[in-house]
Amino acid sequence: MMTYDARDGYVVLFGGVNTGTDPEATWTFVHGTSIHLGSAGGPGFLEGASFAGDARAGYAVLFGGPTVWPSNETWAFSNGTWSALQPTVSPPPRSFAPMAYDPHGGYLVRFGGFNDDGDTFFSDTGHVGVRARELEPSCLKLRARMP
């Protein structure tokens, strides 16, 4: 998973496919240089997590992804350090859910994702991070499209 952290001014890469070569590692890329930060103190292996920069909060947010089943873990990455977030409201567990920052609303929006059986892709939408909340379906005009 990869995103741009506007506050810190670099691209952040987290994890990847579990090939046995540090799938929990974090890397930053700034001014043409990659820096390997390792995996200490960060999330565990979360293939399929959502990752996006939250410009208003000032950090990148990692959400969900399967450990064994999809989770709703929420992590912040800022200034080279991971911190587990404990939002008062957290979206339901999801994996492979698209997520992006909405600059007009000032929050991250997550759309759908797979549930714990891995066969059902939802079309629900919610905010992610410390201002998390689920959005009412009546205010949405998005639909899941699967090939």
Image: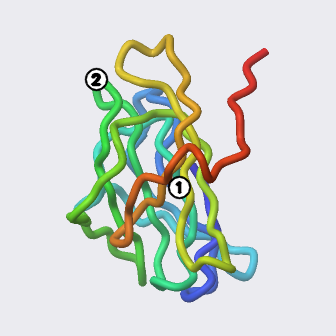
Relative to 98, residue 79 above or below: below
Considering depth in this image, is 74 or 83 the residue closer to the camera? 74
The percent position of residue 129, horizontal first and vertical second, equals 39, 66
Marks 1 and 2, Cα distance to the nearest angstrom? Answer: 19 Å
Relative to 55, residue 14 above or below: above
Badge 1, how many Cα within 10 Å: few under 14, some, many 20+? many
What secondary structure is found at the residue carrying circle 1?
A: strand
Considering depth in this image, is 7 or 92 the residue closer to the camera? 92
Tag 2 residue = 68
Considering depth in this image, is 30 or 128 the residue closer to the camera? 128
Considering depth in this image, is 19 or 92 the residue closer to the camera? 92
Tag on residue 112?
none
Q: Residue furthest front?
A: 138
Q: Residue at x 30, y 37 (%)?
A: 71
The percent position of residue 41, horizontal first and vertical second, equals 23, 62
What secondary structure is found at the residue carrying circle 2?
A: loop
Left of 144 or right of it: where is 118? left
Q: Quadrant of the C terminus?
A: top right
The percent position of residue 14, horizontal first and vertical second, equals 49, 53
Q: Are marks 1 and 2 in contact (CB under 8 Å)?
A: no
Left of 38 or right of it: where is 136? right
Q: Amino acid at mark 1?
A: Phe
Badge 2, how many Cα within 10 Å: few under 14, some, many 20+? few
Q: Residue at x 38, y 43 (%)?
A: 64
Tag 1 residue = 51
Left of 93 or right of it: where is 50? right
